[in-house]
Image (tube, rainbow, N blue to C red):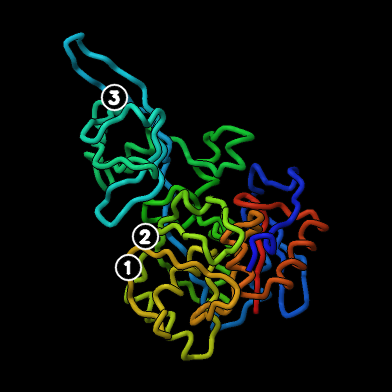
Amino acid sequence: MKLSDFDFELPNEFIALRPVHPRSSSKLLVSTNNNIIDDQFSNLIKYLRKGDRLVLNDTKVIPAKLNGQRIRYSDNGKTIANVGINLLSINKDGHWLALAKPAKRINIGEEVYFDEELKATVLDKSPNGLVLKFNLIEEAFDKKLKALGEMPLPPYIASQRSPDELDNEDYQTVFARNSGSVAAPTASLHFDSALLNDLNNFGISITKVTLHVGAGTFLPVKVENISDHKMHSEWGEVNEHAANEINKTKLAGGRVIPVGTTALRLIETASKSGAIKAWSGDTDIFITPGFKFNIADGLITNFHLPKSTLLMLASALIGTERLKNVYSHAINKQYRFFSYGDASLLLP
């Protein structure tokens, strides 16, 4: 398929720069067969059945924008240079791929200092960025990032305003647990504790998986033939308990509906043989029209960028023409788009 098949015009004023409050008061577009329904996210339960299972991504966004210093010693004495670091993604060894500014003057083996306690060693350098090993890990690392870093807002928001204290809460799901993302699983931002309780009481099951969202989720597709696109990879995990829960729902005839493209990509990666199995590792699965879904029976997701891999994934689930109708309807009804925008429930 052609990249132009996934293009559309979106007025700039439709890009949401802030979320609505409370979270579940955002709009919800429901697409079933050829029907489109306009509702509110707090009414999600109306479109689900007892025995359905939602799959949530419990990754936690880290304040990934840091300011540090590079220190060198020479015959002329000590020189200090400021360095801006944007963390992009974490690998299985716990090392971070990062962009640095300025990057040309940083060498492999050098250290970047962020304060008296936090520093990072440059392990590798390539056109993709730096590979950094931090001296702190897990809770100690999270605590330092919270104190020193800024939330990494998506480019289409960051270009129009700076991150602030509100984003520390707004750009994080209420069930975030495992640190490692530099972008939020934004479909999950619509859930609040009250809605989760209502779903549980109604008989909707919840399963949590982890996929650490990297900055590659915002990379544009630049090739006209989408099959030539090289997909970015992200680390994820479906543990044995989660896999058993999902298989149990499928066997009982319930629907498995991932919340967000990240959760969908992960469970389809873990179910390439048919039934889902415990799995962990890096996934670069690229889901486009023609893809055979083994697990997902629907998708809760936001409204995505033109020409994006996320738009292609949604097209694969419900069909390209049907998705075009959904987006045309959303624009006509003035839905709010992208990370802080409104939601859709897409049912094949």
Going from N to C along the chain, the mark reached first, 3 or 2, is: 3
At x 57% / y 79%, what residue is drawn? Answer: 297
Q: Give residue 191's quadrant in the image.
A: bottom right
In the rendering, at what x and y percent does residue 228 appear? Answer: 52, 63
Is residue 203 in sight in this rendering?
no
Residue type (three-letter) at the residue carrying disc 2: Trp
Kind of element beneath mark 2: strand
Residue at image mark 3:
70
Asked whether, in this view, residue 263 is left or right of residue 226, the answer is left
Residue at image mark 2:
235
Q: CA distance from mark 3 to mark 1?
A: 35 Å
In the rendering, at what x and y percent does residue 64 appear? Answer: 41, 40
293 to 9, vertically: above or below: below
Residue sitting at the far right? 332
At x 26% / y 15%, what residue is drawn? Answer: 79
Residue at image mark 1:
280
